[in-house]
Every structure is written in structure tokens, then in C-alpha cells.
Image (spheres, grey):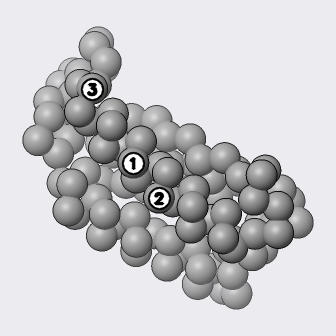
Amino acid sequence: MEIYLGKYLYSKSRAAPAEYTIVIEQTRRTIAKIVCAMVNHPNDVSVEFTVNEWNVEMLVRVRAEDRGQVIGRQGRLADSLRVVLSAIGQKQRVSYTLNID
């Protein structure tokens, strides 16, 4: 199955092109910097990504006691992170989803 992500054609049977991976990696580092600035233990922050059929899924992992600082009251900070990620994705023509663990 082949799908169109950004300006690249992605197939489950082959790896994403190097340029595409570079763009996702830059986005991953940007989200990691933002999250590191929000938490008390920035060394324990990790941001991983997987390319799905329809989009790129970012998974943010933080310590349990820092999770509330990333999510915020009523999820406002998490929603703000999603808005930033969406704006980056619109510029790159890539769909992103953000999960916090």
C-alpha cells in the first residue's frame, strides 16, 4: 500500500526517503526542546516517531511526576503542543499526531 505524505510517496514495503526522515527528525527535535523547557527533569524526556499509513505519530515520554506539566490544566498545554505540531505539519505538508506517555 502506498500513500502520499508531504511531497514523498511512502510505502510500507520500503523505507521513507532520507529527505523525509530528516524533516521528521527536525520536527522531533523541536518538540523535544519545547517539552524539555516545560518539565523538571529534562534529561528523562524522549520523543519518538513512527510513520503510519496516514500520518506521523509522535510519542512524548516523560517522568510520571512531569506528565501533568506537559498536559496542563484541562489539557491546554497538550492542545497547544498539538497546534504547534499542526502548524509545522502544514508547512511541511505532513500530518502529525501527538501522544503523551
Q: Quadrant of residue 9?
A: top left
Say what amino acid the circle numbered 3 marks: Ala
Question: Which of these two is toward me, 28 or 95?
Answer: 28
Place of residue 86 in the rendered image (x, y in percent of width and height, measured from the top left): 34, 66
Q: Are marks 1 and 2 in contact (CB under 8 Å)?
A: yes
Question: Rounded to the nearest whole Å, what is the CA distance between mark 2 and mark 3?
Answer: 19 Å
Question: Which of these two is toward me, 75 or 8?
Answer: 8
Q: Quadrant of the N terminus?
A: top left
Place of residue 96 in the rendered image (x, y in percent of width and height, measured from the top left): 37, 54
Question: Rounded to the nearest whole Å, what is the CA distance between mark 1 and mark 2?
Answer: 6 Å
Q: Label for residue 72?
A: none
Q: Is residue 48 visible?
A: yes
Q: Label for residue 30?
A: 2
**Callout 1 secondary element:** helix
Q: Is residue 56 visible?
A: no
Pointer 3 or 1: first along the chain: 3
Q: Residue at x 58, y 73 (%)?
A: 78
Q: Label for residue 26?
A: 1
Q: Residue at x 75, y 75 (%)?
A: 69
Say what amino acid the circle numbered 1 marks: Gln
Q: Label for residue 18?
A: 3
Left or right of 37? Residue 14 is: left
